[in-house]
Image (cartoon, coloured by chain):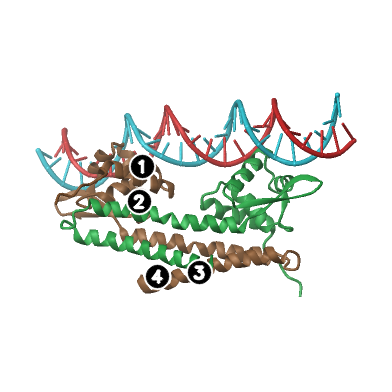
Chain colours: A brown, B green, C cyan, D red
Amino acid sequence: MVEEKKISKEELVEKMGIHFEQSGLTPLHGRVFAYLLLAEPSHKDFFEIQEFLKASKSAISNAIKFLLDKEMITYITFSGDRRRYFKVNLKGWKAKMKKDILAMSTMISMLGEVLSHKNVDKEPEFVNEITDFRNVLLDIQNIFKDYFKEKG
Amino acid sequence: MVEEKKISKEELVEKMGIHFEQSGLTPLHGRVFAYLLLAEPSHKDFFEIQEFLKASKSAISNAIKFLLDKEMITYITFSGDRRRYFKVNLKGWKAKMKKDILAMSTMISMLGEVLSHKNVDKEPEFVNEITDFRNVLLDIQNIFKDYFKEKG
DNA sequence: TTTTTAGTTCTGCAAGTTAAGAACCAAAAA
DNA sequence: TTTTTGGTTCTTAACTTGCAGAACTAAAAA
């Protein structure tokens, strides 16, 4: 049975690129990451990335620099070959996600400060709503802590 | 015992504003929301917001429009008073957060497409890593679904 | 009717961002 | 030593954003 690949690599890179863009990367950074996710073999050199994405060297260089810095990609090398071969770093990506999720703690502590500024007697319903919301965040945070404790 | 409020309202608005900015709002949109979170009473009119934040009418108008559209705030009115009094909408905020979290499903389905493009025989370890990562996302999504099913 | 209030919408600009192009550089090859 | 390879860094153009200011509008007050 021949497998049908409904959507081309190019199209999928664009589509995923848009998603990464929406989650904070620049269009090109997103496309570089998407390209590497789809790459077969999973490691590609500078020129292959540049050629596929038809972008300038400087843009590719900066994208690689950025993604390396965020630990969303790493690279491997082969002896007798000066080029670096870049590939997605799933561990780094996961760590980043974990960090983003746990950034919730900032919100939790800020809501704590908000509550400490409130006069409970004045608008008890509103104070309760904030408290409840903060408790939801605390619940979620604990669920995650448990999950990450168990599953890394 | 007299309560000491360590940090001023102004400072807290700036601090929270920066946090909201980092999570996608513009600086001013973030500050308006932060101001309303701290407001006592919890509803403030256009001019009070403008005065506190020292911003232009148009900027405040657009911030309010934006936050209303995202359902992060609502307003109440009082008979014989034409002004609208804006206040944070905790239900709407929570709903937005929930929606943002469940936007993860886009990533899950994209990784599904990535996997369908992969030749499993070629780099089984990498395919497994992606599969594992996708499963983590699925786990997290389910944890949220369960939590929200139980606790609203 | 005119004026004031409570905003909204339009216009414009300063600041920031994205990516291109060219100049540059270090290591390896010739 | 010179040239090529594999990039990085600097500069710049095009575009986007965030917000101010001014013009505008509809409802209420005078």
Q: Could you tell me the amino acid type at mark 1?
A: Leu
How far apart marks 2 and 1 lie (CA) works out to 11 Å
Chain ID, mark 4: A
| Residue at x 33%, y 63% (from the top left corner) | B135
User: Marks 1 and 4: which is nearer the front?
Assistant: 4
Q: Is residue B60 left or right of residue A76?
A: right
Neighbours of disc 1 within 10 Å: few (<14), some (14-19), many (20+)? many
Quarter of the image where one finds residue D13: top left
Q: Earlier in the sequence, mark 2 or mark 4?
A: 2
For mark 3, what is the residue?
B150
Q: Could you tell me the amino acid type at mark 3?
A: Glu
Q: Is residue A127 above or below residue B74?
A: below
How far apart marks 4 and 3 lie (CA) works out to 21 Å
What number is the disc on residue A148?
4
| Residue at x 54%, y 57% (from the top left corner) | B95
Chain ID, mark 1: A
Q: Are marks 2 and 3 in contact (CB under 8 Å)?
A: no
Q: Could you tell me the amino acid type at mark 2?
A: Leu
